[in-house]
Image (spheres, helix red, strand yellow):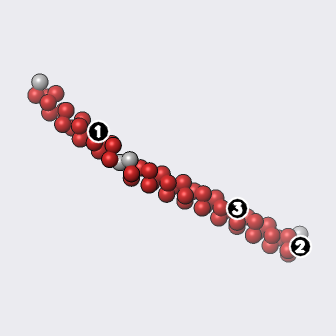
Amino acid sequence: MSLSKCWMLIFSTKMFVESINIQYFNRAFFEASTTSSSSHVPTAVSSSEVSNVPMFSEV
């Protein structure tokens, strides 16, 4: 294998790995942003569940 082919293989592998890392970072950032923006709904549900528990225990 010549040096130029070896360099091209290393370069293409490096670009491939970087593209995977960028895709993974974008997906993780998107999931983090969606979970943080929709975190109000679970907190509202959990607060209503907590408020319903004392009423149920009193009955």
Who's the residue at 28% across and 42% down the image?
44
The type of residue carrying mark 2 is Ser
The answer to which quarter of the image holds residue 46 is: top left
Which disc, if any, is residue 3? none
Place of residue 9 in the rendered image (x, y in percent of width and height, measured from the top left): 79, 67
Who's the residue at 39% across and 51% down the image?
37
| Closer to us: 18 or 44 | 44
On screen, residue 1 above or below 51:
below
On screen, residue 15 above or below 52:
below
Q: Would you call the spot at circle 1 few (<14 residues within 10 Å), some (14-19), or many (20 or more)?
A: few
Quadrant for the N terminus in the image = bottom right
Report the Cα–Cα distance between label 2 and label 3.
Answer: 21 Å
Q: Would you call the spot at circle 3 few (<14 residues within 10 Å), some (14-19), or many (20 or more)?
A: few
Which numbered disc flags the more N-terminal residue, 2 or 3? Answer: 2
Query: Of helix, strand and loop, which one carries label 2?
Result: loop
Who's the residue at 60% across and 61% down the image?
21
Query: Of helix, strand and loop, which one carries label 3?
Result: helix
Place of residue 12 in the rendered image (x, y in percent of width and height, measured from the top left): 75, 65
The label nearer to you, 1 versus 3, is 1
On screen, residue 35 above or below 5:
above
The residue under label 3 is 16
Which disc, if any, is residue 2? 2
Report the Cα–Cα distance between label 1 and label 2.
Answer: 64 Å
